[in-house]
Amino acid sequence: MKGYAKTPVGAHYGLGDWLLQRLTAVVMALYTLGLAACLLWHAPAAYADWKAIFSGTFARVTTMLFFTALLYHAWIGMRDIFMDYLKATSLRLALETAVVIVLVLYLIWAASILWGR
Amino acid sequence: MDSAPATRPSTPRRPKYYDLSPAHLPPPGLVSIFHRVTGALLFFPVLPGLLYVLQCALGSEAEFARVRDFFAHPLVKVVMLGVIWLYAHHFFAGLRYLLLDVHVGIAKQPARTSAVAVLVLGVLATALIAWRVL
């Protein structure tokens, strides 16, 4: 093929996505350890205990940070999987679009759980 | 006069075929494919499931009781073992990749040892959480 041909694979070649996947992984790993420690410390059993854990501003903000990191992390991961196995561009782009929409919905859902009601 | 080149027994036969079935993968290969599969499954269906449970558990007293009763079911507990392993394996495998990225344990033998450690830690963490929580 001659000349300029754009291959719509969705990859941004370079350090950006690679680094972002690692940074978001660190954020989520720290949150996981923090939440595990919190649950071990408080040992929530009743509804009020769980409600109390997720009602503080710090807990809400860090949980939201976790889900935001997850959005980027899962996007890069799912995109890599599609790029590896799906050769048909139409199918790949359709599924990548679906993943983006689903991930944004997850984020909105998480925010509504934490701040809604 | 024989002009055929002598075949040395140490020469690897070409082309070389790799057996890539999971049953024959070395530990680092197992960790890798499990990392990918667990990641995909965490995206769907684990994540929406988790959000739904969180929504119910934080929703109201009655909904919380419904969630608690649901997780008391033995079959649900078995499924939860699997879900916990998905997260645990993805977690430990991810830590290993972060270390490899900064060139910690990148030689063949340490990488193989850490891969076995990841596989063992995933199961151990699942057992520990199951024993404490389920």
Image (tube, coloured by chain):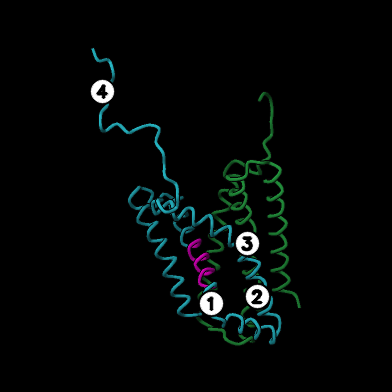
Chain colours: A green, B cyan
Residue B75 at x, y = what percent?
55, 77
Q: Are marks 2 and 4 in contact (CB under 8 Å)?
A: no
- Determine whether the residue tagged by mark 1 lies in a helix, strand or loop: helix
Q: Quadrant of residue B30?
A: bottom left
Where residue A100 appears, as percent x and y from the top left, is 70, 54
In the foreground, B3 or A80: B3
The amino acid beneath tag 2 is Leu
Q: Nearer the viewer, mark 1 or mark 3?
A: 1
Tell me the distance, in whole angstroms, between the alpha carbons under discs 2 and 4.
Answer: 70 Å
Say if labels 2 and 4 share a chain.
yes
**Image quadrant in which you'd find residue A74:** bottom right
Q: Which residue is mark 1?
A: B77
Q: Disc 4 sits on a residue from what chain?
A: B
Task: Please report whichever mark, 2 or 1, sits nearer to the chain's N-terminal start.
Answer: 2
**Distance between the alpha carbons at the discs numbered 1 and 3:** 19 Å
Q: Is residue A8 magenta?
A: no
Report, in whole angstroms, how far the alpha carbon at label 2 lies from the one at label 1: 17 Å
Exactly how many numbered labels are in the figure?
A: 4
Q: Chain of mark 3?
A: B
For disc 3, the marked residue is B44
- Percent position (x, y) of residue A36? 52, 74
Q: Which residues are magenta?
A: B80-91
Q: Which chain is home to disc 2?
A: B
Query: Is the residue A21 above or below the residue A109 in the image?
Result: above
Residues at marks 3 and 2, CA–CA distance in whole angstroms: 16 Å
Per the image, the residue denoted by label 2 is B54
The N terminus of chain A lies in quadrant: top right
Q: CA distance from mark 3 to mark 4?
A: 56 Å
- Magenta stretch holds residue B90: yes
Callout in the foreground (2, 4)? 4
Q: Which residue is mark 4?
A: B6
